Image (cartoon, rainbow, N blue to C red):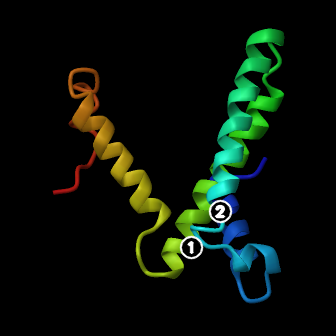
Amino acid sequence: MHTYEEFLEVIKELRSEHGCPWDREQTHASLKQCMLEEAYEVIEGIEDYEATGDYKNLREELGDVLLQVVLHARIAEEENRFTMEDIVDEICEKMIRRHPHVLVTLLPKIPRNP
């Protein structure tokens, strides 16, 4: 089974100078339609799951959305804007800020950014 870190390396390699021409030429703007289509396909995957109990399509479509997120993060990293780690950090901070009543037992264990 592959790891999240391996996935990040795959995307980095696809975007590298000897990677995939299609992946290398993508920008935030060129990926807008892809992100929208993948989001709609997740909705269809949820509907399929609700109708049949089969989660395989939902799992695949969520992976496609994750691909879009990681591609955007990689492009931003190449532009020295932000990284995937920055995205994860920011969403963690947001969830902590919005749910301190739920995360009260975790808060002492979770390192916080100043």
Above or below, 15 against 11 in this view is below
Q: Residue at x 75, y 27 (%)?
A: 44
Mark 2 lies on a secondary structure that is: loop
User: Which residue occupies the extreme left position in the image?
Assistant: 114
Of the numbered discs in the image, which one, if any, rests on residue 89?
none
Would you name the residue on which mark 1 appears? 75
Residue 1 position in % (x across, y down):
79, 47
**Are circles 1 and 2 on residues that touch, CB within 8 Å?**
yes
Task: State the residue at coordinates (27%, 39%).
Answer: 109
**Residue 58 lies in what quarter of the image?**
top right
**Is 73 above or below relative to 42?**
below
Crowding at label 2, few (<14), some or many (≥20) Cα neighbours within 10 Å?
Answer: some
- Considering the image in quadrants, where does the C terminus appear? bottom left
Asked if 5 appears above or below 64 in the picture, the reply is below
Q: CA distance from mark 1 to mark 2?
A: 11 Å
Residue 49 appears in which quarter of the rendering? top right
Task: Give the percent coordinates (x, y) of residue 105.
Answer: 25, 25
Instruction: Please identify the quarter of the rendering in which residue 11 is found.
Output: bottom right
Tag nearer the camera, 1 or 2? 2
Q: Is residue 107 left or right of residue 5?
A: left
* Three-letter residue code for mark 1: Ile
Between residue 57 and residue 27, name the one nearer to us: 27
Which residue in the protein does label 2 denote? 31
Indicate whether 60 appears above or below 30: above
Q: Is residue 53 left or right of residue 67?
A: right
Residue that extends furthest to the bottom in the rendered view of this protein:
17
First reached walking from the N terminus: tag 1 or tag 2: 2
Q: Secondary structure at mark 1?
A: helix
Q: Amino acid at mark 2?
A: Leu
Residue 34 at x, y = what percent? 70, 55
